[in-house]
Image (spheres, rainbow, N blue to C red):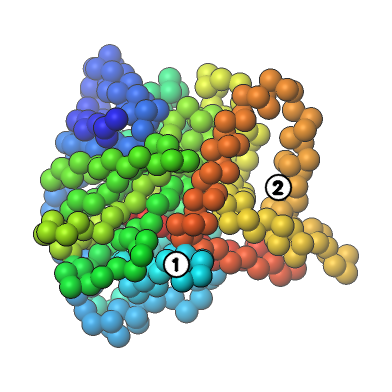
Amino acid sequence: MEVPIIDVSLLQQADAEAEALQQLAERLGEAAEAIGFIVITHHGVDEAILQRAWAATEAFFDQDEAQKLLAATEDEQSYPYGYSRLEGEVLSRTRGENGVRGDLKEMFSIGPKDSRSGMPPRRWPKSPPHFRQAWEAYYDEMLALAHRLLRGLALALRLQPDFFRENMGRHQCALRALNYPDLEGVKPAPGQLRASAHTDYGVVTILKSGGPGLQVAKDRGNPQWIDVPHVEGAFVINLGDLMRRWTNNRWASTLHRVIVPPEGSGWGRRQSMAFFVNINGDAEVRVIDGTGKPKYEPITAVDFLLKRHLTAMGALDQAQAQAQPTDGAAADPVAASVEEEKAAEPQKPLEEEAASAEDVKEAEAEMQLEEEEGVEVEVEVEGAGKDSLLLRISRLCC
């Protein structure tokens, strides 16, 4: 199995021939189903905007650590963006002497500009000069590319072209830059990677990579890793867990990681910029018609993400216990909705249970893998209501 390389120039053409556009969409759909990863060329991204953002990012990471730490958040619950130092994220749970340390990367990220998204206002580093201007332009360029890609993916599912975009009016898209330092003379700890194995939780991720090292594996239980081709000028697209659910498991949300450079490879430093396409938090995700008998009940995007994080970390019981009503307070609706979903499972028809048994097995394997490979989540519940379920997510990306 290989990650396909697809020319998506037709997505830029307002007058593209319908038949040709549908053929392109079907190629995207085939790749989404087969492996969940696509390398796209002729994407229409402004090269000058890309280069300015790339240079500004490199200049930011080249600063001394004290300067970069000025852009770190003091409270990830209220501001889950900003700077994260080398090995400062994704600390694996200690397993005796074989505990895996944090990933060999440092990061900087921002969220959406629109306050209607429900996310906090952006905070910018004071240096280097023109960083904000370069990043704002690149964020907007990535959002435009996301809209084009979502149009193609909608056509692949025989939906109206704006099906996905209609859920993006108050989107929660995030832009994250990653710097993987040169590891010459550095001996990583056992099991330590540049980015540990993971899937993305959202809809789609758009990655600009500065070098090789990204690998994917379709089989989550016994992963067989293959290299994602590094194509100059291209972007790497992968689907997230929410899209997998939306398409009733037709499309794949695939494990991926970034490996430590093999000895003698000469890879050196690696930089990447990942744009995470996240829809409106209150958007309802209902299994798309025509994808078979629904394996999932409708759910809002924000509830899916909360439940996904809780379940993946085995923190559900803790959250439910903490969310029990006290002094007349109402129970937390997120934990309650999980309990309702669990209670409803035995009442489902036998044929539906049989159809989803493979999905349950795959999900359990994924949860175990994430615990072993380094997704760290801390959950606190204070009082009642979804807003009181404070979540600290250490997400991996490439």
- Secondary structure, mark 1, is helix
- Residue 304 placed where, x, y %? 59, 46
- Residue 101 placed where, x, y %? 40, 69
Vertical relation: 116 (above or below) 249:
below
Circle 2 residues within 10 Å: few <14, some 14–19, many ≥20: some
In-image side of 27 versus 371 (left or right): left
Residue drawn at x 28%, y 14% as measured from the top left: 19
- Secondary structure, mark 2, is helix
Q: Quadrant of residue 68?
A: bottom left
Image quarter in which the N terminus is found: top left
Vertical relation: 310 (above or below) 206:
below
Sooner in the amino-acid sequence: mark 2 or mark 1: 1
Query: Hey, what amino acid is under mark 1?
Result: Asn
Residue 285 in view in this figure: no
- Residue 240 placed where, x, y %? 44, 43
Circle 1 residues within 10 Å: few <14, some 14–19, many ≥20: few
Query: Hey, what amino acid is under mark 2?
Result: Val
Q: Quadrant of residue 69?
A: bottom left
Residue drawn at x 48%, y 48% as measured from the top left: 201
Nearest the viewer among 138 and 175 is 175
Image quarter in which the C terminus is found: bottom left
Q: Residue 338 carries which label?
A: 2
Residue placed under numbered mark 1 in the picture: 98
Nearest the viewer among 270 and 264 is 264
Residue 189 in view in this figure: yes
